[in-house]
Image (cartoon, rainbow, N blue to C red):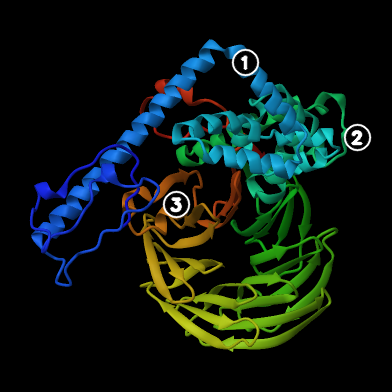
Amino acid sequence: MNIQNDSDVAFDCRSINSDDEEGVNIMPISAMNTDMPVSIEPLSTGSTNTPIYDATKKRIAEERHRADLAANVSSINSRHASSKLSLTDSKELERQQEQCMKLFDHWSEESQVEFVTSLLKHMCHHQHGQVNQFLKPMLQRDFITALPAHGLFHVVEKILGYLDAKSLCAAEMVCKQWQRTVSEGMLWKKLIEHMVRTDEMWRGLAERKGWVESLFKPTSMMSSACHDDKYYRDLYPSIIADIERIDTNWKTGKHKLEKIVCRSETSKGVYCLQYDDKKIISGLRDNSIKMWNRKTLECEHTLTGHTGSVLCLQYDDNIIISGSSDSTVRVWSVHDGTLLNTLIHHCEAVLHLRFENGIMVTCSKDRSIAVWDMLSPTDINLRRVLVGHRAAVNVVDFDDKYIVSASGDRTIKVWDTSSCEFKRTLNGHKRGIACLQYHGNLVVSGSSDNTIRLWDIEFGTCLRVLEGHEELVRCIRFDNKRIVSGAYDGKIKVWDLKAALDARSPTGTLCLRTLVEHSGRVFRLQFDQFQIVSSSHDDTILIWDFLDAENSFEEEGAAGSNKHQPNRTYTYVTR
C-alpha cells in the first residue's frame, strides 16, 4: 500500500497497539520523507486479517482522506485569492487575454482546436454548460435563407415542397425571408397542383369549380388575376371549405335535385345508366338507349336496334356495349350512335356485362357467364363459358385477378380471371342476389333478402350485414368512404363504409342518410364524391348534387313537420 503525504497530518500507531510483534510497524507520517512512498508490510509472516490490522488500515485511509481535503481547501483558497487579484487588476488581465488571442490567431486550425479541447478539459461542469449555451446559436444555420444566396433556390423549393398546408403556413411565419421564399417559389400553387394530381376529390373540384385553368401552366402564361402566390394561398382554404361542406351535405342529406323524365313511348322504366361530366347514357325498358346532355339534361341521341328491354350497358371513350332481354350484346359508336357489332351467344336475357383492358364478361338468365376477348369493336371473340350457378346470373364484376358473379341461387362465385378456373363460393344470403361490386379484397352484395353483405374475397368470410331496406336491394356501389344502395322500396341509402368494416361500430350508426324521391323501384345508380345519379321504374333519372346544394337550412324553423327532411332544389326536364 502506497501513501503520498500531502500535509502535516500524522498519527502514532502505538496508540492502537503497543505490541509490535503481532501488529504493524508504522512510522509517524510527520517523520517520513515526503518525497518517498510509504511501504507498509506486516512484520509477521502470519495472517494479516486481524482486527488490529484492519483498524490500522482504516485509520490510514481516514488520514489520507483528511490530507486530500486539506489539499482541496488550499487549492480553493488559492483560486479565490487569484480571483480577487484579477478583479483588482482587470487591465492586466485584458492585456494577457489580448496576448493570448494574438498567439491563438497565428496558430493553425488544427492547433487551435487542440488548444480549445485541452482548455475545456480543465473546466468544470457548470463552465461547460455556459460554453454550450454560447455555442448553440452559433451552430444553427438558416439554410432556407442561405441556399438562395449560393444559387440553390431550386433546392429550397424542393425541400419546402414536401410540406403540407399547416407546415407551409408555419414556414411563412418564421421570418420575412422565409415568407418571400414561399411566395417567389409559388409553393401554394405547387401544393394545390400536387393535391389535384393525387386526390380524386381535388381533381373533381378543380374541374367543376373552374380553377383547374390556373394550374399546371408556366407563370408567364397565367393571367394577372391569378398570377401571384396570394391567389393560391387564398384558394387553398376555400377548397378545404368546399370539401368539408360536401362531406357535411352527404351526412345531412342536403342536396340539389335535378330530374329527367324520360317519357318512354311504350313501357316505362330506366333499367341502367352510366354518366360522366358531359353526358348520361341510359338503357330503357322501351328497347332504346338514350344519351342526355349533362348540363342541359336534354336528349341528344336515341339508339335503337334491340328488340327487348336494355338491361345493362357500359361505355368508354369510343364504344357503348349493351345487353338486352333479346339475348344479344350490341356494340355502338359513342360518337354518333352507329351500330358496330352484334354478339349472339346467350340463349336468354343478358342481365349484366362488364368490359375493361381487352376483356368483356357477360352473364345471363341462362345461368352462364361468357368471357370474351376484345381485339377491336368489330373483333370480339368468345374465350370461355363459365358454368356453375344453378339459377340466373344477375351480375358480374372483375379485375386482373378475379371474376366475381352473383346469382339467384343465393351464392357468389369467384373465378380466376386468367385461367377462368373456379376458386370459391361465398355463402350467406338467404335469398337470391341481385347486385354486387368487387374492388380490392372487398365484395359488397345486395339481395332479395333485403340485406347488404360485405365479404372478404380471399377468405370468403362475411364481414358485416347491413339491414335497413324493406324490399329487394337492386343496385349497390361503393368507394373508399361510402356504400350507396337502391332498392325496390324506392329508397336510396348512404352507408358509412369505414364504420361498416369496424366490428366495434354499433349497427345503428352505419346508415348515414336515406334519400326518398323516386316513386318506383330503384333499378340502377352510380355515384362519385359530388353526386348520385339514379334511375327507376318510375321512368325518371335523378341527379342528387351534394356540391351545389343551396344554403337553405335556416328555413328549417318554418318547415313544420318536415323539419327533418333534407333541403333540396329541383330542376325538371321532360323529354
Check disc 2 and report the residue beneath it: 221
Q: Residue at x 69, y 76 (%)?
A: 360
State whether residue 279 appears in this view.
yes
**For this rendering, which residue is in front, 465 or 48?**
48
Residue density around tag 1, few if under 14, some if 14–19, many if 20 or more, within 10 Å: few
Which residue is under mark 3? 495
Q: Which mark is nearer the camera, 3 or 1? A: 1
* Sequence-wise first label, 2 or 3: 2
Residue nearest the observer in this picture, 289 or 204: 204
Which image quarter: residue 47? bottom left
In this rendering, the answer to whether 78 lies above or below 62 is above
Observer-side mark, 2 or 3, equals 2
- Point 68% across, 44% down: residue: 162
Q: Residues within 10 Å of mark 2 (few under 14, many from 20)?
A: few
The quadrant in which the C terminus is found is top right
* Residue at the spot of label 1: 92
